[in-house]
Amino acid sequence: MPDLLSRLKAAKHLEIPPPEDMLIEIILTKTFAQKQLNVADNVIAYILPRIGRSLEAVINVVNSIDKHAFEQNKPITRTMVAKLLENVI
């Protein structure tokens, strides 16, 4: 155990920052595409600064938007997403 402790202390420590907007945008676009949903760029741009910076947050938002659009039988628009996110936040 002392050997392991000394190795851990000698190891470099790195902080992993949250993903940048470009990566979140790519994940958002890909997640919508996997659900075969066409979402306009302005909708992605609206969502981007309003969600958490994790894969889980992206998936949850996309699932909520998909479910809401399906239940309402309406296309995904910026207005619809704004109302939905307003209720979530």
Image (cartoon, rainbow, N blue to C red):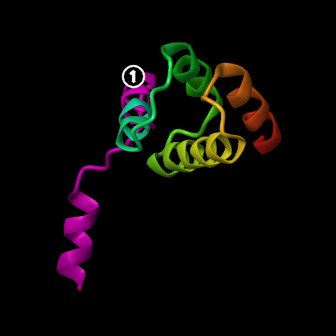
Instruction: Out of 57 and 34, give the one closest to the viewer.
Output: 34
**Mark 1 lies on residue:** 22
Q: Quadrant of the C terminus?
A: top right
Q: Does residue 5 lie above or below 80 as drawn?
A: below
Tell me the quarter of the picture where residue 80 sits: top right
Q: Quadrant of the N terminus?
A: bottom left
Indicate left or right for 39 with 34 as reference. right
Q: Amino acid at mark 1?
A: Met
Q: Residue at x 52, y 39 (%)?
A: 53
Q: Residues within 10 Å of mark 1 (few under 14, many from 20)?
A: few
> Mark 1 falls on what kind of element?
helix
Q: Residue furthest top?
A: 42
Q: Position of residue 20 (x, y in %)?
A: 42, 27
Q: Residue at x 21, y 76 (%)?
A: 4
Q: Position of residue 38 (x, y in %)?
A: 45, 27
Examine the structure image and report whether residue 42 is included in the region drawn in magenta: no
Q: Residue at x 19, y 67 (%)?
A: 7
Tell me the quarter of the picture where residue 21 sits: top left
Q: Position of residue 17 (x, y in %)?
A: 42, 37
